[in-house]
Image: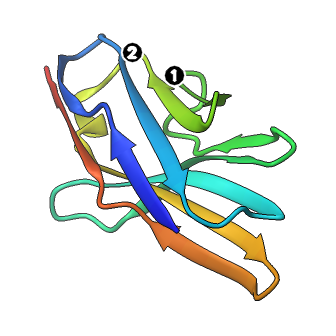
């Protein structure tokens, strides 16, 4: 399974950006796809997730500003009202259920820089 993020870049505070995550490889019987981020000098933290049924979860820091949704064969993270503290490397992770059980796969990340 390969996970590929795209859509990062630079934005001014208050602007919007959209990230995309595509997964290639085995078909998952069940899955949860999540976004995580790691700011400079910080630990990687949970941002949002969406499961096969479309249920979503968000961290308190992004609730109301970020939206995760399925967009064709990819999953998008729509980010609005960006803040300087949203600056981070954003990673996509898929937890995938196959005949061999649950496995997790991470992408390489895409950088988001927000200037105030």
> Of marks 2 and 1, which one's residue comes earlier in the chain?
1
Residue occupied by mark 1: 65
Residue 63 x %, y %: 59, 31
Q: What element carries label 2?
A: loop
Label 2 with label 1: CB-CB less than 8 Å: yes
Residue 70 x %, y %: 66, 32
Q: Which residue is drawn at 58% across and 53% down?
A: 34
Q: In this view, does 34 lie to the left or right of 79?
A: right
Q: Which quadrant of the view contains residue 41?
A: bottom left
Q: Which mark is residue 36?
A: none
Distance CA(mark 2)–CA(mark 1): 6 Å
Name the one closer to the observer, 26 or 49.
26
Name the one closer to the observer, 37 or 107.
107
Q: Is residue 73 above or below residue 50?
A: above
Q: Residue at x 26, y 46 (%)?
A: 110
Q: Which quadrant of the view contains residue 68?
A: top right
Q: Is residue 1 above or below residue 87?
A: below
Q: Which mark is residue 81?
A: 2
Q: Residue at x 39, y 15 (%)?
A: 81
Disc 1 residue crowd, few under 14, some 14–19, many 20+, Cα 10 Å: some
Residue 5 x %, y %: 37, 46
């Amino acid at each position: 399974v390969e996970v590929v993020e795209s859509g990062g870049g630079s934005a001014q505070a208050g602007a919007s950006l959209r990230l995309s995550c595509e997964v290639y490889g085995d078909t998952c019987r069940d899955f949860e796809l999540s976004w995580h981020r790691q700011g400079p000098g910080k630990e990687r933290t949970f941002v949002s997730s969406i499961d096969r049924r479309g249920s979503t979860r968000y961290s308190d820091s992004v609730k109301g500003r970020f939206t995760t949704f399925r967009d064709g064969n990819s999953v998008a993270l729509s980010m609005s009202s960006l803040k300087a503290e949203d600056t981070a490397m954003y990673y996509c992770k898929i937890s995938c259920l196959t005949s061999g059980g649950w496995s997790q796969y991470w992408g390489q990340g895409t950088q988001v820089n927000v200037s105030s």
